[in-house]
Amino acid sequence: MKDADDTAVDAKRDYEIRAAGDAHPMGWETPAINDLRSALDHLGKFEGEIYQTGVPVDPRAELAGVYRFIGAGATVQPPRRRGPAMLFNSVKGHEGSRVLVGLLASRRRVSRLLGAPERELGKQMGRARHIVTPPRDVPQSDAPCQEIIHRATDEGFDLRKILPAPTNTEEDAGPYFCMGLLLGSDPDDRDNVDVTIHRLCVQSADELTIFFAPGRHIDAFRRKAEARGEPLPVTVNMGLDPAIYIGAEFEAPTTPFGFDELCVAGGLRGVPVELTQAVSVRQRAIARAEIVIEGEILPGMRMAEDRSTGTGKAMPEFPGYTGDANPSLPVLKVKAITTRRNPILETLVGPGEEHVSMAGIPTEASIWNACEDALPGLVQNVYAHPSGGGKFLAILQVRKRSAADDGMAKQAAVIALAVYRELKTVILVDEDVDLFDSDDVLWAMQTRYVGDLDTTFLPGLTGHVLDPTQQPSYDPRVSTKGTTSKTIFDCTVPHGLKEHFVRAKFQLVDASKWAPDLYDDARRAGERAILEGTFQIGKEEGNR
């Protein structure tokens, strides 16, 4: 068994090997990124991916209000746009702190951070799930996350003054940590670790409330500890290598109970995630995090989410609505906060493109893996559409090889609904339809779909509690929140009729010759792939 010093040497060597540019075992050139700072350095090589401002910003509503117009995208109410990540270097009331928003709010940006082409990200994630690379421990002396330590026993300790937790809107229940990766372990087995992101509302100088969506594994650990009257030690890790955030978004059954999602991030990077011992609780922290909040989830203690404000609202959630404040949530008692020097607090705008990337790409990977295992060669690609926040709507592109595949395509949709329980709607399209182009998908729906013939309803299934339609007041047929009817829209051509549904074939030309000022690099690369015959709808090689 290697000691911590040997492990640290191994980690340094592995990172240097990755930095030398060796290809990842999956075949993609994965950037040499191992924390948030190296991710920002890498993005700095590309024009228009990161924008910094020194104009002072108020973390209360103003910061999110700015980014709504700069780059939030997805389900934020228009006007909105997709744009660069934004680093606020001057935060009112928090001298020396910085706030980053939108790092993953662009599929192109995720591609540049992970190394696979935009259209291949789901497959990259799917393969990473099978390359299990467990995290490893490093000594605290090699953990940048502990360069500065604030203990709750220090005079004047107040997390509200130490960290600039933002509020998204004026009616939020309070300041929130939106990108806090909670790390906890089974009370009976410290090596059975789970990491998940939950909304964490700041309630006092040393208290946070935690909203656990149903079925989360850390909540199972909490319940076990609470049944014994024991607190559950946890760390909240913020400002991380983007691979850690995305890898943590896998859910059961893709990552069953007992599977450590940090193994996925290790698979994506080809090197293990580094952990270190927390300074105040018996738990590990992510060693290269910008910020770590250490504490215990207290047994038997509950608190109203909007205790401090009484707004009745929580915060904007990924479907695009502001959720109701929960009247009774578990409480995290903070024991310490550790940071890097001049730390960067990472946040997101709830109903935005960043949530789509974090939730949607693992959704694509889960569906792709399950369909490829059950029906090899049928599903060509999967896209978790932004309109569903990366969770509610999936588009499956299929290639029918015989009449039997008319039924198999619907079977693939059923598999998708089974493997990702929060999924609500599946749209099936043929291989000549660009599943990443909403106009093309809607075209297929208008020309290859008949409502009462090609629609399948699956009522009474588990969905997601944050969908406002999934409650008895909207649908009297359901008995509890988070239950809904799921729908499959089959917008594919019956195999025997394919010759009657051939799209018009235009001459292949390089149009940039006539209008060069209308073209960016990505568009040129895509059209060049078409001309060279290497482009397939839903599988575009090399277009980042």
Image (tube, grey):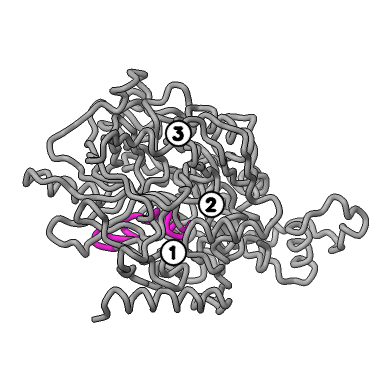
Q: What mark, if any, has residue 166 been given in the picture?
A: 3
x and y percentages locating residue 309 in the rendered image: 34, 20
Residue shown at 22% from the left, 41% from the top: 153
Residue with the mark numbered 1: 371
Q: Nearer the viewer, mark 1 or mark 3?
A: 3
Mark found first going from the N terminus, 2 or 3: 3
- Image position of 166 with respect to 185: above or below: above
Say which of 537 and 135 sits in front: 135
Q: What mark, if any, has residue 212 been given in the picture?
A: none
Mark found first going from the N terminus, 1 or 3: 3
Q: Is residue 22 left or right of residue 415?
A: right
Residue shown at 16% from the left, 33% from the top: 301
Magenta residues span 241-259
Q: Is residue 343 left or right of residue 281?
A: right
Magenta stretch: residue 317 in it? no
Q: Residue furthest left?
A: 228
**Which residue type does callout 2 highlight?**
Ile
Q: The N terminus appears in which quarter of the rendering?
A: bottom left
x and y percentages locating residue 206 in the rendered image: 27, 35
Say which of 36 and 211 sits in front: 36
Disc 2 element: strand
